[in-house]
Amino acid sequence: MADLARPLYVHGVGHFHPEDVIDNRFLEELDIGTDDAWIVERVGIRARRTVLPLDYIRRTRNADVRAGEEAARYDNAETGRRAASHALARAGLTAADVGLVIAGGCTPGMAIPAEACRVAAALGIEAPAFDLNSACSSFGAQLHLVASMRGLPPYVLVVNPENTTRVIDYRDRATAVLWGDATTAAVVSTEVPARVRVVETTLASSPAGWRAVTIPRHGHFAQEGNVVQRFAIKTTLACVEALLPAARAHAAARGGRVRVIGHQANLLMLEAVVRRLELAPDAHWYNVDRFGNTGAAGAPSVLSERWDELADGDAIVMAQVGSGLTWASLRVEVGS
């Protein structure tokens, strides 16, 4: 755990969801042994977005992930550009202001070059760019690293393109019901103050569990569902419990509210954590019911959707868990 010596300022957060919707009715029509009640009872997800054309999924079930790459309406560079443009607009900045680009997530479009280079090129940015991948916990890992760096340019762009439906097997109901696509971006700074600031970060992993969640090169997503769910509940609970006391103290002293954002993998898992923490329902922010598991983009996409609701005095605790096994968390404060 790192209580930051100086805050990491967040100037703007943005997101992009592709327009094609995979709702539970669509999955039922694929005839893979699932329906709306089965899905909602197990994971609480009602809809997801995808970069894949729906007709392509109906026709092929995405049996060949290489064909999925070719069929996708958008690549990671384009969705990264769109999310980054949203974040930059909120920050009141342009691409020319960005001095470093960091990207990462679960499903890079290419082995090389770095996704960050492709996103930077799409934005017309000529600056250092590299990837930092830690699966679904990439956003937390990236901010943990940036907060510890020195000699940074005034503004750093962090992008998480997560178009994971390209590697989902739509013949397998256990995984087809989970995933959706989203991309997020954040403009951060260690030097230029902003109203929203990260004041504490954590990053950890248990590499012995790496086999529990995998995406082989040119293969489909796979996971050991029960193992992963137990890990996710236990780890999310521990991450949030560790950061909640300071978050509550900040909000109480400044008349704000505490908000909790978990990894957007499974609504029932998140609700189990909320019950154990005895949090008020309105303290729990989520969008997994509408967008599914969007990997590293899940938690920051919730923050982006709620960006205009942040009030002075608020405190946000974010927790992400992912393949590796890895986990990261952030404590965020709002106000001048």
Image (spheres, rainbow, N blue to C red):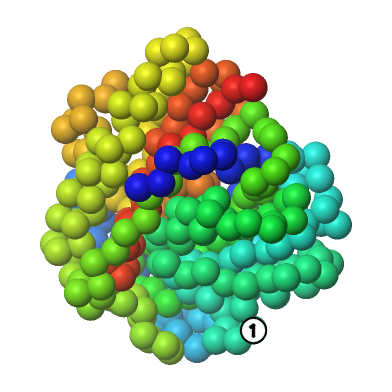
Q: Nearer the viewer, residue 103 or 142?
A: 142
> Residue 142, relative to residue 65: is it above or below?
above
Q: Nearer the viewer, residue 282 or 330?
A: 330
Q: Residue at x 14, y 64 (%)?
A: 227
Q: Quadrant of residue 103?
A: bottom right
| Residue 48 visible | no
Q: Residue at x 68, y 71 (%)?
A: 129
Residue 98 vs residue 195: left or right? right
Q: Nearer the viewer, residue 39 or 194?
A: 194
Residue 291 % position (x, y):
45, 50
> Residue 258, relative to residue 128: is it above or below?
above
| Residue 230 visible | yes
Query: What secondary structure is found at the residue carrying circle 1?
Result: loop
Residue 102 vs residue 164: left or right? right
In the picture, which quadrant includes the C terminus?
top right
> Residue 83, relative to residue 240: is it above or below?
below
Q: Residue at x 68, y 64 (%)?
A: 101
Per the image, the residue denoted by label 1 is 113
Residue 275 % position (x, y):
19, 31
Q: Quadrant of residue 119?
A: bottom right
The amino acid on which the numbered mark 1 sits, given as a three-letter code, is Pro
Q: Nearer the viewer, residue 162 or 127?
A: 127
